[in-house]
DNA sequence: GGGATTGAGCACCAATTGGGTGCTATTTGG
DNA sequence: CCAAATAGCACCCAATTGGTGCTCAATCCC
């Protein structure tokens, strides 16, 4: 069984691969064909992913012969959170939390007496802070900038309490 | 669309609810019936969840009339990561990473030339550090212990680079 | 001992979601 | 006009998750 909590969808993975390629070719125009030739991913799905990223305003595109995609902004101005949101939808940790979306469909029975809503919300914000705190640029140049970055995440999630002993559940 | 990255399964939610109830009744023995009476969740599924937690060694149980469940350890010695691992399986962010599991099924074609494996691994470890750094006790007594806790997460994920500007994708 | 209560185990079904493709229209360069 | 390339959308199939049925085993109380 794979853990859904920590799982990125293939769409997101393909999107990230494509975006990293765009970073590599920053300033130029890149076609889906080119990306698909470089990485053994379903080219068609890659195209769908790029379309999504385009609709989200992360990349821009040019149709017609010689067309393709390029980053709509410099790589340091694109966050991982933004990418994930574009390809997997708005962030919400549980079915009752849509965080800005319409409240019309949040219909969990437990909601009234739920003891985990509040702490989980904080956790979600913490994870999201991680994603927001990671730029596309930093993904490209990994093993660079060993800077502490969790200021916001820390502030948000800290009330959850002190750390445990950190056992490894994979054992 | 709900974001799978930040989504807990119902099983985990129910499990957490049950566990928090056990924390409340720490020292006593609690039946599934009792928990099911307090929260409007499918009692049967709640039972399955408790079984899983039992198999994972998080709770202990007593069969027969008057039987039930109790925490196998004090609440501060049970981490959220452990709970999630018990109910949703071992942590792995992408299909190629099983982190200790058998390598026989990690069969992503991209693997050889994948530019995102390494950074995503680090991200996964960061998220997991968050989960491991949260104890069941701290979930119960939220709004307590405003302690900084991300030492391990920080150390692990820091190489990903500096923070972005933190836009809100839900807007 | 006998019945009621409660957990253990396992298989099974139904709904949702994610992975992936087909098809057609539209834009652009030559 | 033709070829290349993106845009849009509907659709199918496999996997996962949410939820149940049924049976067995242990324990308490009378
Ligand atoms: S109310 Fe509680 S159980 Fe229901 S979706 Fe929200 S967090 Fe989960
Ligand atoms: S190799 Fe890359 S694309 Fe394949 S599962 Fe791993 S991270 Fe994802």
Image (tube, coloured by chain):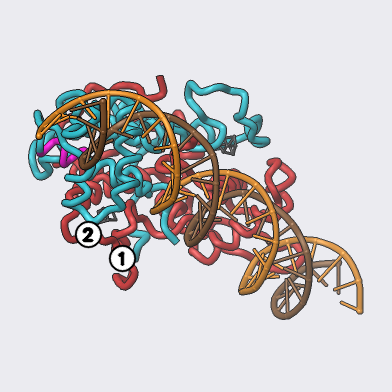
Chain colours: A red, B cyan, C brown, D orange
User: Where does the magenta region start and end?
Assistant: B18-24
Instruction: Classify residue A156 as left or right of residue A137.
Output: left
The N terminus of chain B, quarter of image? bottom left
Crowd around label 2: few <14 · some 14–19 · many ≥20 (10 Å): some
Q: Identify which residue is drawn at 65% across, 54% down.
A: A45
Magenta span: chief secondary structure: helix
Look at the image and tell me whether residue A76 can be seen.
no
Disc 1, ligand 1: is the CB inside 8 Å? yes
Task: For ligand 1, give the image quadrant.
Answer: bottom left
Residue, disc 1:
A106
Disc 2, ligand 1: is the CB inside 8 Å? yes
| Residue B44 among magenta residues | no
Pick the residue in front: A103 or A139.
A103
Instruction: Classify residue D19 as left or right of residue B142.
Output: right
Q: Quadrant of residue B79?
A: top left
Look at the image and tell me whether residue A37 can be seen.
yes
Measured as percent of width and height from the top left, residue B77 is found at 19, 24
Measured as percent of width and height from the top left, residue C16 is found at 47, 60
Q: Identify which residue is drawn at 53% across, 59% down.
A: A53
* Mark 1–mark 2 CB contact (< 8 Å): yes
Q: Identify which residue is drawn at 47% across, 39% down.
A: A139
């Amino acid at each position: 069984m794979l853990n859904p909590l920590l799982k990125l969808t293939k769409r997101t993975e393909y999107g990230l691969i494509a975006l990293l390629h765009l970073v590599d070719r920053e300033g130029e125009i890149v076609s889906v064909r080119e990306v698909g030739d470089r990485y053994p991913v379903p080219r068609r799905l890659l195209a769908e992913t790029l379309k999504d990223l385009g609709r989200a305003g992360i990349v821009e595109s040019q149709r017609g012969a010689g067309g393709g995609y390029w980053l709509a902004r410099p790589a340091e101005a694109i966050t991982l959170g933004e990418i994930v949101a574009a390809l997997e939808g708005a962030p919400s940790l549980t079915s009752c939390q849509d965080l800005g979306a319409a409240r019309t469909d949040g219909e969990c029975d437990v909601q009234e007496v739920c003891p985990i809503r509040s702490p989980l919300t904080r956790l979600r914000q913490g994870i999201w802070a991680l994603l927001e705190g990671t730029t596309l640029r930093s993904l490209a140049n990994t093993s660079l900038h060993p800077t502490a970055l969790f200021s916001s995440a820390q502030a948000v999630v800290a009330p959850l309490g002190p750390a445990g002993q950190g056992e490894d559940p994979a054992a």
